[in-house]
Amino acid sequence: MKQKFQNLKTPFAKNAKDAWSIYPRPQMQRASYLPLCGDWSFYVRKSNACIPLGKINVPFPPESMLSGIMRTPEKHGKYLYKKIFTVEKAFLDERVLLHFGAVDQIARVTLNGNCLGEHVGGYLPFSFDVTDAVHCGENELCVEVTDEIDTDIPYGKQRHDRGGMWYTPISGIWQTVWMESVPTEYLRHLRITPTVNSVTIVCEGGADEKLLQIETPHGTETYRFTGDTITVTVKEPRLWTPETPYLYYFSLTSGKDTVRSYFALRTITVGRANGRDLLLLNGKPYFFHGLLDQGYFSDGIYLPASPDGFRYDIETMKSLGFNTLRKHIKIEPECFYYDCDRLGMIVFQDMVNSGPYHFLIDTALPTVGLKRGISHHASPRRREIFESHARETVTHLYNHPCVCYYTVFNEGWGQYDADRIYGELRTLDPTRIYDATSGWFTKKESDVRSEHIYFKKLRFKDGNRPLVLSEFGGYSCKLPQHAFNLDKTYGYRFFETEEQLQDALEHLYLDEVIPAIREKGLCAAILTQVSDVEDETNGLVTYDRRRVKVSPERMQRIADALYKTFGECFG
């Protein structure tokens, strides 16, 4: 029987046309900026034919309402995007760079008939130096996309036969496209490493002599240096926490190039208090009260109608007392992480999985207790792509203070060589916490003990690592007027009313989570989840972001009880 779906619009849709023309890289801003979002010509390739489908609103994926296409993806589909745009002579400085936020899965890019190259992977930014291809006046940019949900390439929760915990797949351009002009010697990358009272900035590229100006509560501090590295001790440091998310903004000038950026003074480590291994924020035990965050929206699917959608999720979850979001198997545009930085929301970031999913091996057997000894085979191609993607993820998000924790493998999905990959990522960035095997199929190496518990009471064994409940709950309350699928519902426990849902959450936290803090040293708990997603109705807000299902006052009282208990035990 054909299922009945509702087209749900979020409150942010009224601003969708030009909303993503904002500057897309808040940690490395330049004055030069040419946005290339908006209307593009859109085609589907079949054999040697190129069939026009009209105009598409970039950066929304073609499967979404907001794209203007709303096309069901084909299993062997190829898409072609074309954009005619004008460049003024003043923009053509010494070098010109073309940037893509993300294109799923394989993108081949040409500019004015010049092949720029190919990028594989649907979640990370990539760029081309287009100095020799761009010219003053009219230009034509073409992007050919291949997306077969190749499981050798990280693909997240996308699946052609969507349903249950699997969601509508997206393809093509789904983050911003833009250009900037730079001098010949320009700053290509910054690596910013803070402590609780200093910051080290390492520059890649640029001229040898540099000028750093840091804005502080006491005025602007100026530093001149040569080479690629500077360490600054901060006077009267203000530490970053979710409660006090202070950011230090700065400008860095290198020759003719100037960029604006920011840092925060923050550390995340493992330590010990009252006989328990715990996670420490800025050297002190901290309870991470969080939610699973899939990052799906009813009208834009992979992208909210405007950046206001990200801000809404962050601010709403903070109003409910949460301080952490586990970004689940998806990497967002940089504005999401900037909002978490400035608003004060810790991010536990998942790597995006690759490899086929096996229900029996990856879910059914672990749920009944078989949680060790299983691993998957990974082809050389999948290994190369996954590990490259993981390294790029760590490099891409390195400067964001909100990102405190990485999940490498989730519930065995695509898992292989977990100990080795843990070690390599930890060497690349030793400033974060690494959950090598979230949920089950643990190996020898990980910074935490990571448990998923859905269908039984919370019970934990003692261990010698910080205890993290990285998924639990999944309580479903379906509000039909805000539901995507009117015929099917997915969740782990079901409640008819919002009052029943609220009561159940109170019992879960007060009767099970709080005793686990006292008795086992639980230091992080990640509830499923922020919002409903398609068939899943286990969110605290609806898929269209128009209804919060729980009481902010009662949720805040739960949060206060968690923090109070944790402080009494380990503060």
Image (cartoon, rainbow, N blue to C red):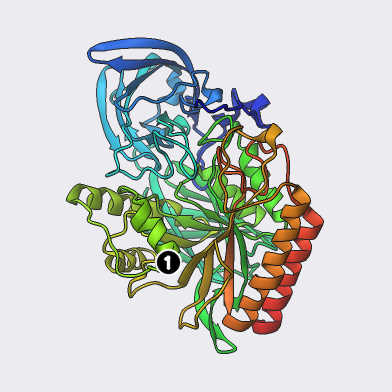
| Residue 563 vertical position relative to residue 311 in the rendered view, above or below | below
Q: Which residue is mark 1?
A: 434
On the rendered image, what quadrant is the C terminus found in? bottom right
| Residue 366 vertical position relative to residue 29 in the rendered view, above or below | below
Say if residue 134 shows up in the picture: no
| Residue 445 vertical position relative to residue 300 in the rendered view, above or below | below
| Residue 353 vertical position relative to residue 24 in the rendered view, above or below | below
Which residue: 23% across, 51% down? 384
Q: Is residue 167 left or right of residue 380?
A: right
Mark 1: give few (<14), some (14-19) or many (20+) Cα within 10 Å: many
Say if residue 468 shows up in the picture: yes
Q: Is residue 16 left or right of residue 360?
A: right
Q: Name the residue at the bottom extreme.
A: 275
Q: Name the residue at the front extreme.
A: 1
- Camera-side residue: 154 or 239? 154
Query: Horizontal and vertical percent for residue 62?
Result: 46, 24
**How many tags in the picture?**
1
Which residue: 37% across, 33% down? 97
Residue 117 falls in which quadrant of the image?
top left
Which residue: 57% across, 33% down? 22
Query: Horizontal and vertical percent for residue 482?
Result: 68, 34
- Camera-side residue: 509 or 385? 509
Query: Horizontal and vertical percent for residue 350?
Result: 45, 55
Q: Secondary structure at mark 1?
A: strand
Give, as a three-letter code, the residue at label 1. Tyr
Which residue: 33% across, 40% down? 121
Query: Horizontal and vertical percent for residue 274?
Result: 60, 89
